[in-house]
Image (cartoon, rainbow, N blue to C red):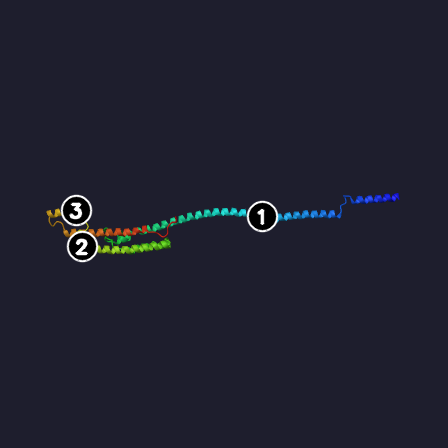
Amino acid sequence: MQRISKKTVSNGTSECQRCTNPSRPSNLDVWLSRVSHFSQFGLFTLTIGAFYFTVIPLYKTAALEESIARREAELSAMTSKLVDATAALETVRFEIYERNRGDLIQGIVTAAPYCSGLMMHATQSEKSKDRELGSNLLKIDAAQCIQDEFNQRKSEAILNGEDYKKLNETVRQIAANLSEIQKKTILDIENVPRLAEKDPSTLSPPGPYASEVEQLDRLVEEVAPGLIDKKAKFNAAVERTRSNMAIAYHNLVLKEFLSLREIEWPTRKKQ
């Protein structure tokens, strides 16, 4: 009996020790441990996923925005330089245009002596038998001359549309003025002898010493009557008057030509 009891006690003690022995975990502890491991792994995976799908895209977005901002700054700087360069180029281009336009006007103006007949081109001068100053005045159609000069200068190729239209209208107006001036001058020159016979005061005086010359002529006539040829004197006065009229005509032609320099051009430099 005692052996059995001891054995029983001994077995009971062994079973209790086996139940409370920490070195042998139960199934619950095992699963809890596994779940903990799975949770840690899942949390790690979630962390990696969150980093991959949130942090990295945000970083890429920030880097992209920074790159865009830097490119925009560079683009703004380049745009500013391009604007300045374009403005400078436009200024140079317009200065060249103004110079060409000025040369065109100057070229037309220099034709004034030829259009008035005061000067002749070399080829024309060689053919002319009469070489006296002013002999060719009024022999050239000044209105047609300025039109021909305008056309020969190829103004349309030099000027833009608005400026060409303005210059063309101005040249036409000047041509009309020259035509009227020339007609009047020719008529006045033709009427010099007739008017002088009625009124000798219409004749041009012989220079700044006209009164002295006239007084001398009277003295000569008193001393030697008939010595002075009055008809020759009259004819000389007529030619002198006609020459003065022709020179005045040339000055009017030159004035009309010079008015080209006063054109108010539609195309102006922007301030």
Instruction: Give, as a three-letter code, the residue at label 1.
Output: Leu
Which residue is drawn at the image coordinates 20% and 51% (left, top)? 241
Mark 2: few/some/many CA within 10 Å (<14, 14-19, 20+): some
- Towards the viewer: 132 or 185: 185
Residue 223 placement (x, y as % from top left)? 10, 47
- Towards the viewer: 255 or 4: 4
- Please identify the quarter of the rendering in which residue 2 is found: top right
Residue 155 placement (x, y as % from top left)? 35, 54
Instruction: Give, as a three-letter code, the residue at label 3.
Output: Ser
Locate residue 197 relative to residue 181 in the image: left or right. Answer: left
Quadrant position of the N terminus in the picture:
top right
Distance (Cα) linking label 1 and label 3? 108 Å
Which residue is drawn at the image coordinates 30% and 55% (left, top)? 173
Residue 266 placement (x, y as % from top left)? 36, 52
> Circle 1 — which element?
helix
Distance (Cα) linking label 1 and label 2? 106 Å
Distance (Cα) linking label 2 and label 3? 21 Å
Q: Are marks 1 and 3 in contact (CB under 8 Å)?
A: no
Q: Earlier in the sequence, mark 1 or mark 2?
A: 1
Q: Check disc 3 and report the residue beneath it.
A: 211
Q: Check disc 1 and report the residue beneath it.
A: 58
Instruction: Give, as a three-letter code, the residue at label 2.
Output: Leu
Mark 3: few/some/many CA within 10 Å (<14, 14-19, 20+): few
Q: Do the residues labelled 2 and 3 touch (CB within 8 Å)?
A: no
> Circle 2 — which element?
helix
> Circle 3 — which element?
helix
Residue 141 can be seen in this image: no
Residue 65 can be seen in this image: yes
Q: Residue furthest right?
A: 1
Q: Check disc 2 and report the residue beneath it.
A: 195
